[in-house]
Image (cartoon, rainbow, N blue to C red):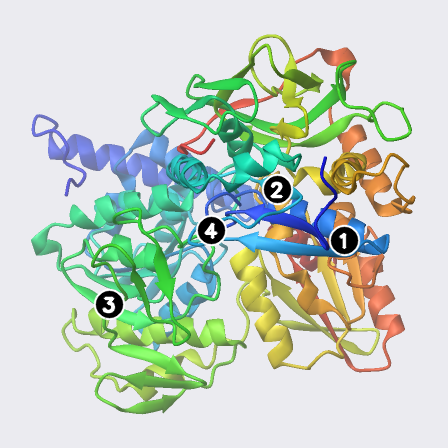
Amino acid sequence: MTISKSSSSSPAADLTLRASTAIHTASAINGLSRLFGRGSGTVIGGRAGLAMDPHLLATLAQGRLVGLVSGTNGKTTTTRLLAAAVKAGGLSVATNTTGSNMPPGHVAALIGTQSTAAAVLEVDESYLGQLIEDTRPAVVLLLNLSRDQLDRIAEVRILADRWRQALVALDEDALTQVVANADDPMVAWAATAARNVRWVGAGQVWREDAVGCPACGGRIKFEESGAWACDTCEFRRPMCRAWLEGTELVLADGSRHQVSLGVPGQFNRANAAMVVTALPCMDDRWDGGPGRTVDDALAAMAAVEEVAGRFSTVVRGGVDVRLLLAKNPAGWTALFDLLDESGGAALPTVLSVNARIADGLDTSWLWDVPFERLRGRTVVATGERCRDLAVRLRYAEVAHTVVPDPVAALDVAIQGTTGTQVEFVGNYTAFAVLRGRL
Amino acid sequence: MSAPATPLTVVVVFPDLLGTYGDGGNGLVLARRASWRGIDVELVEATSDQPIPVGDIYCLGGGEDGPQVRASRTLIADGTLSRAVDNGAVVLGVCAGFQLLGRSFPDAAGGPHDGLGLLDVTTKKGTDLRAVGELVAEPTAEAPLRADGTALPPLLGFENHGGITAIGAEAVPLARVVHGIGNGDGLGWEGAWSNRVVGTYLHGPVLPRNPVLADLLLGWATGSDAPLDRLEDIEEQILRAERTAAAPSASRGRNRGLRRRLFSARR
């Protein structure tokens, strides 16, 4: 890998000056940004710092034990779970808690906490290669890859290929371990290129993006058990060292561990399985690192009850409103499992959809989401693109009302229920808008 | 055309290869609009590992370069789709699906790959800038008319493609671009059609946003000269009004679509 000293002719003192100026500038700008309430102060300063010193991230990461988390869905929560577990082991941890998952956000997270021993960073799928190169991580967690924001982000296969190239390029002395979801063929394709991989059966309910074999163009066949194999070449689901059976985590040694988390859903149990598998890769890398059992690791994660407001409950009009986020077909599909798991068909559900740049401007993904599964619920459609959602629900034959304002929509659902709980599901900015207004 | 099979069969062609832009929605909309009118209808999702079934309406969606080539090869080898068109079947091709209905389209390396030749269009690789954004197009005088003889309303949707599609002598344009890029051939056309084969760059998907187009295809497939029963498309009309208002107006210039550089090699 290349770290800050890209040119041998550039004197170290000059580099240090440049890096330290960049660090001070970035900190100052972020501080001002927060002070004047112009933002959460995570991106603008980082951007300025990187402009002054393109190697700033490498400089800031140097000497820290780094864990990276990437994937289409679950990366914010998994980052939180891993950070909580590392912290519980006794290390101070820097992490990008606000979801700013591109290099300026990483710079901001590391600058604000220059003395931490560890860093746990959520990484946008497109930037994983750069982060691996810059931070020489102890462990990289690869969760899943599926279609998301097609007007903005590259297609799934291109991302998988880029991950693969980044993992091929891992140098031997970096000692990087990869923890990868064996149930997602696109992740498996990327991770088989890495030297050290720990495979986890973390599930992938969405399979529409993994039909064509990434290795040979053949066809991936899935069995009911979740096992998969290409019908043409040798590419198949790798053997796992950990997987879920119901709510239990099962290890290859046969031991079984109940997964009881503060955050709900099978997809979060899967995220926890990834963290449990990744944690020794960090614990083993520092003197005095705790020899923790799987149950210790799970216990350390149980304290996380919400992640940037996701999975949190607010009380409004005497009713508990659970706030949930889903951004793409795979995420919505997994979330419908959660809705079924907790409360049956009865809970009124508010769906909010926006199509700002951060959401993707194209709403065609709505037609990939199995909204049919909401039949029988009381459904209120809201958000800036509630009209697209309403048409989708009409053809899904899901009875619904449309209330464009999200808070008003919530109140309609609250006033209409005789129960004590309402579910709210928003995509990225729709979720943020509602949280900001409650 | 021959009488429609019973039930009316709507085939979504290769959702595993050509389904990038929620394209399954087109088949769903056709099937629902038929069944809401009491027409016996079957919706078939035909994956690429099975022979293509005989149907009355075929929908082909968007896809990436590799899958598009595979879909085209498989469809040519299978032969059912071409025979169905000879027998009067209706075809809707969107984006990559539009391109592969034509004579040729570029493969991942940019070289020409044989299409099905069901529509006289030829697609070449554009610049590395993609057409991405809302697309609004006004049906041309040569566009198909509704069963009651009136013109189609403006066509609305979202486009995301890199190809440039030229229309040959045996097909005619579907619409003229008011906002967006469309075929990108420099003539301002969007989509093409001939006989009962329609191709377009509009997705969103296209039929929920343009229920009149859905009914046009259904009318062709049912073979009835009388207009189909009217449906109260209130939510579709509200969506259309909203999207029309959101797209910059024609007065601000034609072809003001956004071309953006993406990492992608999608169509």
User: Mark 2, mark 1: which one is toward the viewer?
Assistant: 2
Find disc 3 in the rendering and name its residue.
A238
Q: Is residue B40 above or below residue B70?
A: below
**Tag 1: residue type?**
Arg
**Tag 4: residue type?**
Pro
**Tag 3: residue type?**
Pro
Mark 4: give few (<14), some (14-19) or many (20+) Cα within 10 Å. Answer: some
> Marks 2 and 1, how far apart in space?
15 Å
Q: Mark 2 or mark 4, which is nearer the start of the sequence?
A: 4
Mark 1: give few (<14), some (14-19) or many (20+) Cα within 10 Å. Answer: some
> Marks 4 and 3, how far apart in space?
31 Å
Which residue is at 47% across, 31% downward? Answer: B267
Q: Is residue A398 above or below residue A253?
A: above
> Marks 4 and 2, how far apart in space?
14 Å
Checking the image for residue B32, the label placed there is: 1
Pick the front one: B70 or B90: B90
Q: Is residue A158 visible?
A: yes
Left or right: A11 in relation to A320: left
> Marks 4 and 1, how far apart in space?
25 Å
Q: Residue A280: image x %, image y %?
A: 22, 74
User: Mark 4, mark 3: which one is toward the viewer?
Assistant: 4
Residue A396 falls in image quadrant: bottom right
